[in-house]
Image: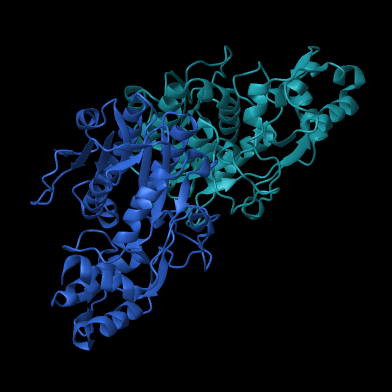
Chain colours: A cyan, B blue
Amino acid sequence: MRIVITGGGGFLGFKLAKALLARGELAAADGRASKISRLVLLDGAFPAELPPDPRLEVVTGDVSDAATVARVVTPDTASLFHLAAVVSGAAEADFDLGLRVNFQGTRLLVEQLRGCAAPPRVVFASSVAAFGGELPAVLDDSTLANPQTSYGTQKVIGEYLISDYSRKGFIQGCSLRLPTIVVRPGKPNAAASSFASGILREPLNGVVADCPVAPETGVWLLSPKRVTEAFIHAHELPAAAWGTRRVLNLPGITVSVADMIAAMGRVAGEAVAARVRWTRDERIRAIVRTWPARFETPRAQSLGFKHDPDIETVIRDYIADEGV
Amino acid sequence: MRIVITGGGGFLGFKLAKALLARGELAAADGRASKISRLVLLDGAFPAELPPDPRLEVVTGDVSDAATVARVVTPDTASLFHLAAVVSGAAEADFDLGLRVNFQGTRLLVEQLRGCAAPPRVVFASSVAAFGGELPAVLDDSTLANPQTSYGTQKVIGEYLISDYSRKGFIQGCSLRLPTIVVRPGKPNAAASSFASGILREPLNGVVADCPVAPETGVWLLSPKRVTEAFIHAHELPAAAWGTRRVLNLPGITVSVADMIAAMGRVAGEAVAARVRWTRDERIRAIVRTWPARFETPRAQSLGFKHDPDIETVIRDYIADEGV
C-alpha cells in the first residue's frame, strides 16, 4: 500500500513518517490492515539524515503545483496525510502565498485523489485557528468556526472540501483540529504560536528565549507524540465512526505560559526557567488573542483520542526524545 | 456609482435590479448615499423584456470564466451583489459544474474585487443549505454549518472567503443565508426546493402541481419581496454592524406544506388547493430532509431584517405582483 505525507519533511510530517515505517502497516481503503510498501514524503526541504529505508521516497516540491501533485498522488495511492501548510504568521503576512498553498494546494490534492483506484483515506491537519471572534469561555464540539486569520480561514475551507469529497464517496477523509504543538524541536518558525515551544525549547538548550505574550496567556496544547498517535488513530477509524461530521477538535490540555515556565523550573531547575525574557510583541499578541485556550472534547475522547497527562510529562518527553 | 449583480438575469437578481433602479441610490464604499450611474447584470440569460433604462447594462456570461469576471468587475465597481449559483439539485447531480460555478466563480469574483479602487461592498446570497447532519430542533445564530450537499458546502466556502477578504480590508462583505424563497414565479427549476413554490404557483395559475414531500414537511421560507429588501438592507449597513461575524441567518417563517396548501385554499378557494397531487420523490426527500425548518434569528432582527407576517400574506403578495 502506498502512503503520501504532504509536509513530510517538516517536523510533524517526518515524525509521522518514522512512526509509520516503524509500524509497518495501516488500514487500507477496505478497512483491512495492509503492509506499507511505499511512503512518499512531499515537501520543500527535508532533514539531512533520512532513514535508509527502501519504502521511503522523498519528493521536493510544492502542493500548490499541479504537476507535482499529479506526480505524487498516483492512482494507486491508498492514503494521504495532508500536513503541508503556510503557517499562521506567514499566511497573515503574505495573503497570496497562504491562499496558494493552503487553499489552492488542498483543492488540487482532493481533486487529484478523485482519480485513485479506490477512495483513499485522508487525514487533514486542521487547527484551532478555526476559532475566533466572540467565543464562549470553554469551547466544545458545537462551537462554530469563525476564524480571524487567513490561515484559520484556509484550514476551515479545507475541512469543508474534505468533508464534501468524502460525503460524495471520492475519498474517506477527516480533519483534525490540532491544538498548539508543544514542544516543537528545532528552530523558531513563522507561526504566531512559535513562542509556545520556544519558551521551553530554548532555555532547555541553554539559550535565552523571548516571550512575546503575557504570563497569564493560556495555551491549548498537545505534544508531538500525542498528535502523531492522533493522525494514525484517525486514519484507522472506520468511516462510520465519523457520521455526518468529519471534523474533530483534538483533546489537549490548557496551560498558562507562567505554568509552562514553572513546570520547566521543577523539571530542569530554576536557572533554566530564568532564561525566559518578557518581550512584548503586539503583532503576535493580536493573533494569539483570537485563539481559544479552553475546550471540552467529549467527541474526540469517545472516539479514542488522548491528551497528555500534564505539562511536566510533555517537558520530560521532549528531553527524552531530543536528548537535551 | 457602478453596481454589479451576478445572476442578474435570474428571478431574484432581476427583481433586485428593478428595485435598485427604482431606488436610484445606495451607500458607496465610504458609507455615503451615492447615485447609481451604472447597473451591470451578469447572467447566462435574461428576460426578454428589459427596462429601457440607460443605467442598465447586461452581460451574457459565466462567473466561472476569468475573462468575463475581469470584464464585469472593473476597478470602478462600488458594489457587488453575488447571486449567481448552480442550484442545489443541479450541484448534487453534477459535482464538477457546482464546483466550477459556486466555488471557482466566487473565488474569481473576490480576487477580482481586490483590484477595485476602493474596497467594494459585497452582499453574497448564501443559503440555509449550510446546515445539515445532526441538528437541534430549533437552529440559531450559534448553530454550526455542517452541510450535507455540495451546494451547501460551496456556499459555506464562499462565506468564509468573503469574510476573510473583508477582514483583510480588500472588500466590505457579508453573507446572507436565505430561507427557501416562496413564491417564485416562472417555471420549476432544478433546485430541490423548487416544489415549495410549485405547490402554490401552479395551482394559482390553474395547473396541477406534484408535491414530492410529505404534508407535514416544514419549510423555512421568505418571500421575494422580503429577500430583495434584505439584500439592500445588508448593503446599507455600516461595516461595524457586522463585527467579527459577517454571516447571517435571515429571518423567515416556518410553514408546513399542508399549511401552505390550506392557506392557498382560504385565499384562492378549495378548488385551487385541490390541484396539488402527492407524488413521492425519494431523491428530493433525501435532500430536503437535511434542511432545517425552525430557526431563531435574534441577530438578524436586531440588525433590522424582517420576515413576512404569515403565509397568507405571502400568497396574496404573489397574486398581486404577478397578476394571476
Residue drawn where x is 59% and y is 14% of the image: A49
Task: Judge whether A110 appears above or below B300 on screen.
Answer: above
Question: Is residue A8 among what the camera can see?
Answer: no
Q: Which one is nearer the viewer's eye here, B124 or B94?
A: B124
**Residue A55 % position (x, y):** 48, 26
Residue most toward the bottom?
A: B270
Q: Nearer the viewer, residue A227 or A32?
A: A227
Please state which of residues A18 and A227 is positioned toward the viewer in this rendering. Answer: A227
- The answer to whether any part of residue A28 appears in the image is yes
Left or right: residue A279 versus residue A50 is right
Q: Position of residue B214 (x, y in %)?
A: 33, 77
Q: Is residue A107 above or below residue A137?
A: above
Which residue corresponds to the image point at 52% horizontal and 66% vertical from the top-left? B138
Where residue A177 sits in the image (x, y, percent)? 58, 41
Q: Which corner quadrant of the image does residue A105 belong to?
A: top left
Image quarter hosting the N terminus of chain A: top left
